[in-house]
Amino acid sequence: MDAPNIGPRGGSVRSCLACKRRKIRCDREQPCTYCTKLRLQCVYPIPPQEGRRAPENILLSRLKAIETSLHRLESKVNQDSSPQPSEHALQSKTVDRYPEPLSSLTPASDLRSGRLVCEDGDTRYVTSGFWPGLDNVDEDESAKPSNKSLISPPATDPPTQHRAPVFDSTTRPKDLHLSHPTGNNVFALWQVFVENVDPVFKILHVPTTQRQILRASQDPTQIPPAFESLMFAVYYAAITSIQSSSYLQNLFQEERQSLLDRYRHGVERSLETANFMSTPDVNTLQALTIFLTCARQTLDKTYIWSMTGLLIRLAMKLGLHRDPVFLEVPSFWAEMRRRLWWCIATLDVRTAEENDMDPFICEHMFDTKFPANVNDADLHLNMTEPAPNLPRHTEMLYSLIRFEGSYAARKLVFSPKFAADNQYPAFSLPEKNDFIESLLKDFDHRYLRHCDTRIPICLLSVTSIRIVLAKVKLTINHPACNNAVPLSNAQLRDLTQSSVEIIEYAHMLRTNDNYSRWIWLFQKYIEWDAVAFLLHSLTTSRLPDLLDRAWRAVDTFFDTWEDRVPEGDRRWPRLKSLRAKALSKQCPPAASSSSPGHPAEAIIKHNRTALFLSYRPSRILANATATARAGIRPSPRN
């Protein structure tokens, strides 16, 4: 993975780049002692290829180059200028208030206007303008993105007093290495991350990150702050995914909450040391994304939502919102950037839902495509061709389903203003239902038909996307969320049965040991909508054939969440009130009141795959395997 060392030329007396970044004395050997010790690439600044010219000649040449650049910019402005708009054009512009998608708003040539600029090891995204145009005058090969420049920390750190104190902690940066686990436990936590987190949250390239972690763990005092933040985020995610406190106590002789607090502070301190707000890079944004995704299970939802907004701004500063094809990024890092952006975009949707807000990211802000459906083994640092989309189950499949499902939800479940701002079609209620059916068929055709439901991660993929789409359908069909005509008896039965199935399937995932390692990702997905709709239907109508099963589902939900609902959540007392109202309207069967039981237990004991092979769920959860032929098709960014 390391490139050949580049030694000093012509008797250069400059320090190598690594020593310059750390502000330590360089012995100017080839390679130097510091780089040899840490197994780093030892690179020296390249001196001028020719002898120095007289200062006057240098000044005159630069002035001439700037003058040429100004003439070029002036001519471009003249070419881009257009005639004064007519009265009709002004009226049209007033009507078209909402922005168009990036691809239709600008010509193809302008889509390539942004670029990545590398200065002193710091990579940032800039759009076209006067000052970036002048930067072209004196740019050299260092301004071209490379594998090294995309992950390197800045060469010099800004003064500490100018850093904004985003996090609150008393841990001193110089003591941070003491917060790392021991060598054996570092590897143990990494293995937990690979088994429990990576299959459902594909943000890293496991082989590359594993080599980096093993190398860094040999001397925790010399880990670059940016990568150290990623290591602490991995520890935090691994602990989050382990639900057994006794297991953690036996392994670390420490309580679960104590470990979470320690590694949370490690993430925060290392991010501040890396000055992530001023000089973000891929490692720091990966760390912050992993941390916020996992912290949703325990930290305040408003804090997570606010920090997600900061994360989005930093991602845009790094140019993650632009597809790498426009930025001439190497193929390997193109995939890493796409994975990172869509993890952030999905987090944006999830936190918006939890806070009853619209997402920060709007359609016209980005054009980043979905990552390729490939395994990590298909990617390597020196690859020159774009990663192919493989027509089979891969390590990326579950994450791709999450990405595309969240992207589709943007068009259906948020405010009308958000839909208008993003120029989404103004769907009627039947069209929304058709869109969901079409989306499910499309998922079946492109992804789910490659899943062997005898494999736990495959069954999880099939189950989770059906639950998510069913919850979306319940949301848009709930009487409180639309002004449509009342539901017909058939629609009411269909949605009531779907509500029951959502609760049953979710309970099955939470209680089955085959999925316990991944349940951390779903801990915040409480079936509020399904229970609310179910209680509403039990209050307003009588469905004798579903009554017993519906009440067992309700009891299961309340038994599961009675002691686990976040304190102060206003939805819980509302559901309890609805439950009391439903009980007063119609008394549940004796079986329901005497023994809630496990509603999906009989099906699971008979045959775990019967859930999808023989059991006949509602039309929402039907296993459509044919190619989608509906008039409304989803439009994934592939």
Image (tube, grey):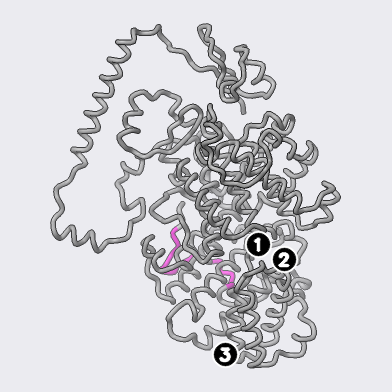
**Quadrant in the picture for residue 116:** top left
- The residue singled out by tag 3 in the image is 540
**Comparing marks 3 and 2, which lies closer to the viewer?**
3
- Percent position (x, y) of residue 109? 31, 41
Mark on residue 270?
A: none
Horizontally, residue 403 falls left or right of residue 549, namely left
Give me the C-alpha separation between circle 3 and circle 2.
30 Å
Residue sitting at 61 percent across and 26 percent down?
Answer: 2
Task: Provide the secondary structure element on which disc 2 rests.
Answer: helix
**Badge 3, how many Cα within 10 Å: few under 14, some, many 20+?**
few
Mark on residue 522?
A: 1
Residue sitting at 48 percent across and 34 percent down?
Answer: 123
Name the main secondary structure of what is drawn in magenta.
Answer: loop
Q: Which mark sits nearer the N-terminus, 3 or 2? A: 2
The amino acid beneath tag 1 is Phe
Q: Which mark sits nearer the N-terminus, 1 or 3? A: 1
- Percent position (x, y) of residue 12? 52, 10
- The residue singled out by tag 2 in the image is 510
Front-most of residues 577 and 146: 577
The amino acid beneath tag 3 is Thr
Q: Is residue 212 above or below residue 473?
A: above
Give me the C-alpha separation between circle 1 and circle 2.
9 Å
Residue sitting at 23 percent across and 61 percent down?
Answer: 94
Residue sitting at 44 percent across and 69 percent down?
Answer: 630
- Percent position (x, y) of residue 50? 40, 8
